[in-house]
Image: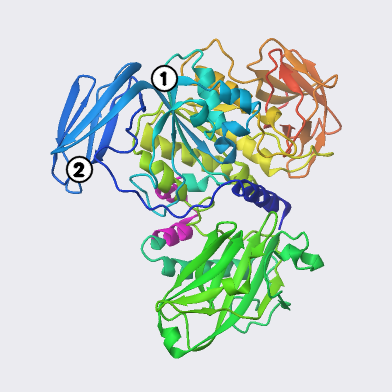
Amino acid sequence: MSRSSLSARVLLAAALATTSTLTMAQPSKPSLLHPLFRDHAVLQRDQPIPVWGEAEPGASVSVAFSGHTRTLRADANGDWHTTLPPTAAGGPYQLTVRAGQVTQIARDLKMGDVWLCSGQSNMELPVWRSLDASSELAAAAHPDIRLFSVPKAAAVSPQETFKAPVAWTVATPDTVREFSAACYYFARELQKTINVPMGLIQAAWGGSRIEPWTSAAALRAQGGMETSLDVLAQHAHDPAGASRRWGEHWQQWWTTREDAAPGDTPWQPGNKAGEWHDAPASLGAWERWGVPALAAYNGMVWYRTQVTLTAAQAAQRATLELGAVDETDMTWVNGVGVGSENRPGDARAYPLAPGVLKAGTNTVVINALDTWGDGGLAGPTTAQALRFEDGTQVVLGPRWQYRIAPSAESPPLAPWHAATGLSTLYNGMIAPLGNVGLRGALWYQGESNTGDGAAYADRLRVLRDDWRSHFGTELPFLIVQLAGYGKPPELPVESGWAQVREAQRRVAAEDPHSGLALAIDIGDTYDIHPPNKQELGRRLARLARQAVYGDQTVLPTGPVPRSASRTQDGVRVAFDGVSGSLITTGAAGPIGFELCGPGSNHCAYADAALDGHDVVLRGASAGTAVRVRYCWADGPVCTLRDSSGAPAGPFELSLTDPEVR
């Protein structure tokens, strides 16, 4: 694995290890009133209120709320939708829906501001894992903060409702415990100045990339993912055909990657390329096999075995059952792709299409990718079997072989994977929210995209615009810039983390309804999940006050870089948004500034000095540099602040034309 690819996957696996394993979404039975509208809900104030649900096709539906009544008919599918008039903050209210003899009532509703809190594990991290959790939980009694957790669910097509039962709850020590710490602390802080009820909708999944949170239509419009999206669409009605097609796509990647060897097709029965060895009869984590090359190995390992079938067995419908695989597999039977999952530690069950099996010898090949901790195909060997429709089974093997498959590239991940696929989490967790009224969205994600940081800016724009097409064209979008993680470098380095942070900064800066909350200084060198979510909540609240509520008396962030230019005294970086003056901590001048040439790996640390609201950089490359970088690393040391203590965040700027000062 390349350093950047491996780093990203290590973090992905670490985050995934903190979450429970979930199957693809199967929607629960819909009700007269959509499950979003339950007791204790908060509805968005001062906006038209969309309400919807399901009744008998053509039924007359009556909706009553705050002295207003709407009467309509359900359509031919039984769906109904109406819009109630805007209502000011307050409550409690009651929402009553009637259709024929059926009545459903939602009580204790409040009108306030509703926030969608989404992303990966740092948004998911619960209050009980934050700083001073015992005291925080003991004090968590806020009757006007209401919590709603979207059940974890992945789906290959948009769902109308949630996978599991849901409820709104009032914030108490018991209900807050498992809720998003960043989201809760944000609302608690914001309510100090915006004194209205706060409704918090948590939709987060540890280890998730950004692509699963974006709709298939938006991803297709972006381009470059057509093959994967076509396979995803096929998977909705033909999983076996999609698996076969994806296997062919995976094979093309293997044979055209940079370190590919001619004729090396390990999935094909009888292929003799590569060095195969006998695996232990117990299988299990390869780190425990006693093989030095696998003792601390993160990467891909090929497995293969055979099973002999009668003609009667081969003619039956069958499912390939595999023990738990850590963490991602791509599996073939007789050279045909039959399945792929990214569910660390979960067993697999792949239904086989007719004609895949044959009488006589059948070959099963598995490529297992592991990027963190133990890896491989769990034992015992008896857990790997073919189960037939008549209830009988045949255990694979007993002989298993393996082959280490080091590669500088990362394999493609199937588009139906939950946390790493395309549109899967949008379909299962965002689509069921319909067009619910929102005051804004908080987005804390990016760690799992650091292996491809250069593409993140476009991905983030697409997500933002996609969500706005569903929740409102001016939906405020508050982005958390990634916290520091990892040891500081001794010399300037290229960093996927820094690329993602720069993408977040630029996307936030270009949009009048977006904002950036800095977290670089509240990270943890050794923990990808920094526990200081209280300070993050305070920063998000300040950002919301300025960017969402128009409070111009508050500076939402620290110093913001405006320009970098070459002058007679060096390279001068000018800052806006400075409270008081620029200051530095731990040294006479700020550290972490770099002067860079045009290509990668052409940066050198610069001497830096404060000059009012500017920083002046000097160094051997000051006369030839074309870029300035600050705090450019996975876990950089950043010492520049302003008088309020707010930090300047990481950035990269191109130098403007020389000027005389």
Q: Residue 270 at x, y = what percent?
A: 62, 84
Q: Secondary structure at mark 2?
A: loop
Task: Tell whether 569 sits left or right of 108.
Answer: right
Left or right, residue 389 beside residue 31: right
Image quadrant containing the N terminus: bottom right
Q: Residues within 10 Å of mark 2 (few under 14, many from 20)?
A: many
The spot of residue 141 in percent (x, y) is 50, 21
Disc 2 target residue:
55
- At 53% across and 35% down in the image, what residue appears? 178
Q: Residue drawn at (55%, 47%), measured in percent from left and top?
A: 209
Tell me where the magenta segment starts and ends, as one range: 214-233
The answer to whether residue 14 is magenta is no
Residue situated in front as seen by the camera: 474 or 166 = 166
Depth check, front residue: 228 or 383 = 383
Q: Is residue 288 above or below residue 553?
A: below
Identity of the residue drawn at 59% across and 27% down: 517
- Does residue 215 appear anywhere in the picture? no
For the residue pair 557 and 523, the one nearer the viewer reads as: 523
> Residue 82 falls in which quadrant of the image?
top left
Badge 2 or badge 1: first in the primary sequence: 2
User: Callout 1: few (<14), some (14-19), or many (20+) C-alpha neighbours within 10 Å?
Assistant: many
Q: Position of residue 210 (x, y in %)?
A: 53, 44
Amino acid carrying label 1: it is Pro
Check disc 1 and report its element: helix, strand or loop: loop
Q: Which image quadrant is residue 324 in?
A: bottom right
Distance from disc 2 to disc 1, alpha carbons, whole Å, reads 30 Å
Question: Relative to residue 256, is residue 362 drawn left or right?
Answer: left
Task: Identify the amino acid type marked 2.
Answer: Ala
Q: Nearer the viewer, residue 91 or 72?
A: 91
Residue ID for mark 1: 197
